[in-house]
Image: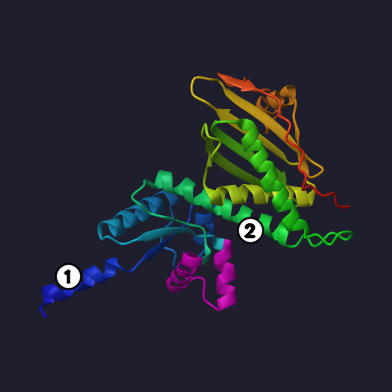
Amino acid sequence: MTTTTTTRLRRALRREIPSTVGLLADEQDFAAMRRYRTFAFDDHGTYLKEIEALLKSLARQGTHTTVALFDPDEYVSYCAETGLDPDHPTSRSRFTDHLATTGARVTYTGQPLATLLPELVDTAVRRATWEYATTVLATAGDCADCGLDLGRDAFDRATRLLLALLDGAGSGTHHLVCSVPAADDHLLAVLHTARDDRGTNHHDPTAATEFAAVLAAGIVLAAPGGLVLRATRPGRPDRLHGWRLVDGTLAPLTEAEVFAAYCTDARTGEPLPPEHGVDHRAGFPLTPDPGTHRHP
């Protein structure tokens, strides 16, 4: 076998080996890694440029590459659990390999880093939210009176509420946001969906499941959560509707309450100008859920 043939075969083989790149997404995480002597970078902007150049190089070679969020705190815990020296390149490589199956990650398809970074952070937030919400549901226990699994019941109820919301919104494109305060976190779920004139909903089933899980967690926690729906149809102003989570169901907000929620700066409390071409509407009543159970 000639040297040329051997080189060609090795290159072909490398293209079949997937690659994972660990990425420090923000300045704070980058600064945390600078404590290690073997970490070569001292500027986050330069680091990001080199990461993007690496990704482009791997793409030119035909390598399937995923980008994983590299969390310095998780890295320290991983090294402590595995007995690795955190100040060593091999340890960082092993942790990145670990992230390939356990961490938040996205596939690199040639998108600019300015697009990839928000996508990666959003994936990490969704993953953490899902893990928190499912833990709440899994540990909710059983109803002392009827023995019902409280987590499963809440998830079933949340699913029915979501379907009722989509039925009430009618045809068009809808953007739903559910916000639930928790003991040491704030859960936020977003769902984009379209409903055709035949009444069929079109959305990512995984996103719908995550949305229902967050709403269900709010039910289990009896948290003062809220939900807003933005309905869009061609040739018409967008409609904004809102509900508050009360006693395990969604109670409609008034038109004034919806307006106040959207036209108030959440950080400062100062009024904001209303968005042009948007109607603020009261939340529409949802059909009473026959499957709803009240638990002490």
Among all residues in the image, which is located at the extreme bottom? Answer: 1
The Cα atoms of the two marked residues, 2 and 1, are separated by 44 Å
| Chain part drawn in magenta | 73-101
Rendering coords of residue 277 (x, y %): 55, 19
Q: Name the quadrant containing residue 170.
A: top right
214 vs 120, nearest the viewer? 214
Rendering coords of residue 63 (x, y %): 31, 62
Q: Which numbered disc covers residue 8?
A: 1
Q: Quadrant of the N terminus?
A: bottom left
Do the CB atoms of the residues marked 2 and 1 lie less than 8 Å apart? no
Earlier-in-chain disc, 2 versus 1: 1
Q: Secondary structure at mark 1?
A: helix
157 vs 296, nearest the viewer? 157
Q: Which numbered disc covers residue 65?
A: none
Can you identify the residue that label 2 sits on?
131
For residue 174, side relative to residue 281 (left or right): left
Q: Tag 2: residue type?
A: Glu
Secondary structure of the magenta portion, mostly?
helix
Estimate how packed mark 1 is, as few (under 14), some (14 to 19) or many (20 or more) residues with alpha carbons within 10 Å.
few
Answer above or below: position of 123 versus 237: below
Q: Secondary structure at mark 2?
A: helix
